[in-house]
Amino acid sequence: LVLEELKVQVKGMHIQPHLHVITVGEDVASKVFVKQKRLAAEKSGMLFSQSCLPEDTTLSQLRERVEECNRNHEIHGLIVQLPLPGSLRSHEREVLDLVDPAKDVDCFHPRNFGQLALGDPTFLPATPAGIMRLLQHYGVETKGKRAVILGKSNIVGKPMALLLAHEAGPAATVVMCDQHTEKVWELTRQADIVIVAAGKHHLLNDPQALRPDGQAVVVDVGIHRVQSEDGKTVVQGDVDASALRDHCRWLTPVPGGVGPMTVACLLEQVVHAAQMQQTQRVCSEHSAASAKQMLLGSGLGENGRVSCAELSALMQSIDPEFQVSAFDDAVKALGADDAGRVSLADFVGWALEGAPNVAA
């Protein structure tokens, strides 16, 4: 359903959103994940491309490829597929930080993750966003509810906690657990929502670990390829579904639960990135000069600052197809004050220079 909605949205856009994925080496699981992204992107009417770098790629070569993609205005969303091979694994953080924040649809860059932590995200991390969509779709109440997250990864656990705990939104009471957490199953027994993202096959396998009334909602983020008793390779999760299925209110399946929603929500971020970048081009290519003249003669920004709402109205008067939501996100980095006002000089400079400070 999400992909069908995206297809309609993409069809009505003046640009075709483009996702580019950089892979290094021959990791089997990564190949599967990238294929899923490619098929979903193509189904939604988006462009998909990939850089397949060999196992022996150096850090310098990988950095160069990332920077080339940053400079390519035809690429709207950029992903460096993890994990990187052994020789580069210790440099993962460095590589992820190289991705232009305006193209960081995985929400890994410190700037984007920081905005998420502040409750004002530009992009949403795909897996946590997919989980939130599932909870909303099935009417799972979160406000004031206890949510226990098993796993503290930067990809799932930490951003999931931030999204659930946001007081102006889901407003759940969140507990994060890792391998050092004492009496973890006592915590899960009190939880209304249990999210298992520890990367350990069948970590949650005992009904006694869930609340006794059978009303817990269990979200399984794990994905493991294991051999069944008959020798076949099957995909299972961090939760033993056969043991817990009859002892909870909802349990997401593996495969077919969180995974497809992750891909769909990732592509939503690509569309959002494309809209933001198109907004920046509108400013720089044919609106900046007019905006400057109108601003200087409009009385806006008489004290040197102007509100985002006033700027949005101005830009819409210049271009009726102007994307207001994308514009608001793009201007965030200019340093809006508590009243939502930015420096007029900063905005004019940003517009005339094609938004270099937003993407830096």
Image (cartoon, grey):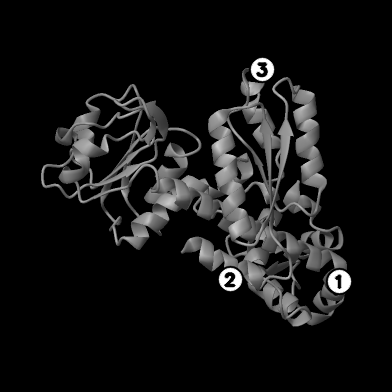
Q: Which residue is mark 1?
A: 286
Marks 2 and 1, how far apart at CA: 27 Å
Q: Amino acid at mark 2?
A: Val
Q: Residue lying furthest top in this view?
A: 87
Q: Residue at x 81, y 33 (%)?
A: 64
Q: Amino acid at mark 1?
A: His
Judge the density around disc 3: few (<14), some (14-19), many (≥20) Cα neighbours within 10 Å: few
Marks 1 and 3, how far apart at CA: 46 Å
Going from N to C along the chain, the mark reached first, 2 or 3, is 2
Give the mark toward the camera: 1 or 3: 3
Q: Which mark is residue 87?
A: 3
Give the mark toward the camera: 2 or 1: 2
Marks 2 and 3, how far apart at CA: 42 Å
Going from N to C along the chain, the mark reached first, 1 or 3, is 3
| Viewer-nearest residue: 200 or 193 | 200
Q: Are marks 2 and 1 in contact (CB under 8 Å)?
A: no
Give the mark toward the camera: 2 or 3: 2
In the image: residue 212, left or right of residue 223: left
Pinpoint residue 2: horizontal percent, then vertical percent.
Answer: 49, 62
Q: Are marks 1 and 3 in contact (CB under 8 Å)?
A: no
Element under label 1?
helix
Pinpoint residue 140: horizontal percent, then vertical percent.
Answer: 29, 57
Element under label 3?
helix
Q: Which residue is mark 2?
A: 8
Q: Residue at x 65, y 64 (%)?
A: 326
In the image: residue 272, left or right of residue 250: right
Question: On screen, 116 above or below 275?
Answer: above
Judge the density around disc 2: few (<14), some (14-19), many (≥20) Cα neighbours within 10 Å: few
Q: Amino acid at mark 3?
A: Ser
- Say if residue 200 shows up in the picture: no
